[in-house]
Image: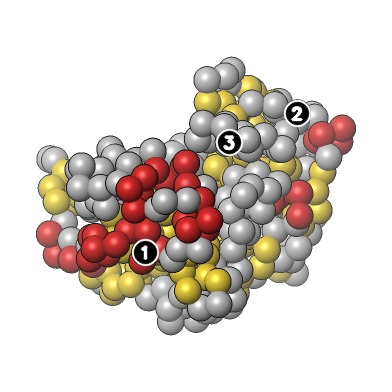
Amino acid sequence: LGGGVYPGKYPESSKSAIFLHNETQFVPDLSNAKSLLGLGVVNGAVWSDLDADGYPELITAGHWQPVRIFKNHKGTLKDASKEMGLGGSTGLWNSIQVGDFNGDGRMDLVAGNWGLNSRFKSTPQKPLNLVFGDINQDGTNELIESDYNAGVLVPVRTFKDLAGPMPFLYSRFKSFRQFSRASVAQVIGDTQTKARLLSVQTLYSCVFINEGNRFRMVNLPDAAQWAPTHGIVVDDFDGDGFEDLFLAQNFFPTRVQGDRLDASRGVLLKGHGTESFTVLESGRSGINLVGDQRAAVSGDFNLDGRSDLVVTQNSGETKMFLNQMKGTGLRVVVQGPAMNPHGIGCVLRLQYSDGMGPARQISASSGYRSQGSLVQVLHPTRVVESVWMQKPDGKILSHEVKKDTHEVRITY
């Protein structure tokens, strides 16, 4: 369970927790509780066995923190984000998902960030900063977005914006000119000890390519940066054997007098079996969403061997898009033991005589607060010999695929 925001205390959060099932009920995992302390606001999380040792890693994403990987050492979690190359990935992350984008059989990551089309700007050299704390001593956190000017941290919001929650500023500053020259330290005065500083180094939505023992960050195309990304779907929508991406975007509930972030109509990105993607415009994709998009999932909802798409919208209609592509894929249904009947954590690949297709994980989470279909649709690009499957314990099995087969059921 990922920690959420305390009312009036953003960006502080409740504690995150892991619960283990002991065959009769869920009980707190006290042995890993310490590893999750200070995790912050968790907007997305997914389990994935990144090193194929039979113990899934925990991957999290949230505001004012990096994408984190907790390495699983036979049941004991350890934050390995820095050693895995994610230490510099601090962002306003809304969502996280896994997918094999370059087809090498290793799970890469895709993370939804705030994007570049808002008043927030950030680079590693000039990060976005937030000073926060109960500065007014009224039981709630005051927020001061800040920037460095000649090495001094200064507020970027107007006097009116800050004086509303901190009325003592009216007596502290006698003119707008005086306020315009003030540092953050001068604004908050002797309440500095109650304030803390957080920074964001990137606002790009991006993929993290798994290179074995490290991940490399690659920004998604410009069209994916026009609005905040929430829902993320990884699937082969066009049946070419490469994983594609759909991003549910926009954010309407901005502060009073702020412009709503509504530049996206939903972004479909065509994969090429590399780290690069091509944007499919609405005229080609058929997706034209004008609302405040949130959760999104894929699934073969009409059982025709094609992956369809469902997108929810904040205060708006839920939309379903039926896939009209030519050709059909292979439906793969996994049946596991009683404790895991749908094979959560299994990884599937199509086996050809001359190689294998990209890996697809059966996951209990999908991007932003949602869960996609447990039935996977894999698209062969040539004659398939079998479906290769890695079980949650890391063991491998193979299931033969006969000619003209449209669905296979794998039981383990």
Question: Mark on residue 186?
Answer: 1
Image x and y of residue 94, in percent? 49, 48
The Cα atoms of the two marked residues, 3 and 1, are separated by 26 Å
Mark 2 surroundings within 10 Å by alpha-carbon count, few (fewer than 14), some (14 through 19), many (20 or more): few
- Residue at (68, 48) in percent of width and height: 117
Label 2 SS: loop
Q: Are marks 1 and 2 in contact (CB under 8 Å)?
A: no
Mark 1 surroundings within 10 Å by alpha-carbon count, few (fewer than 14), some (14 through 19), many (20 or more): some
The Cα atoms of the two marked residues, 1 and 2, are separated by 48 Å
Of labels 3 and 1, the one closer to you: 1
Q: Are marks 3 and 1 in contact (CB under 8 Å)?
A: no
Question: Mark on residue 288?
Answer: 2
Q: Which residue is under mark 3?
A: 258
Q: Earlier in the sequence, mark 2 or mark 3?
A: 3
User: What is the three-letter code of the residue carrying label 2?
Assistant: Asn
In this rendering, would 162 be left or right of 102? Answer: left
Image x and y of residue 22, in percent? 14, 48
User: What is the three-letter code of the residue carrying label 3?
Assistant: Gly
In this rendering, would 122 be left or right of 165? Answer: right
User: What is the three-letter code of the residue carrying label 1?
Assistant: Gln
Q: Is residue 108 above or below residue 335?
A: below
Determine which quarter of the picture holds residue 287: top right
- Residue at (80, 29) in percent of width and height: 286
- Residue at (63, 22) in percent of width and height: 319
Of labels 1 and 2, the one closer to you: 1
Residue extending farthest to the right is: 283
In this rendering, would 152 be left or right of 25? Answer: right
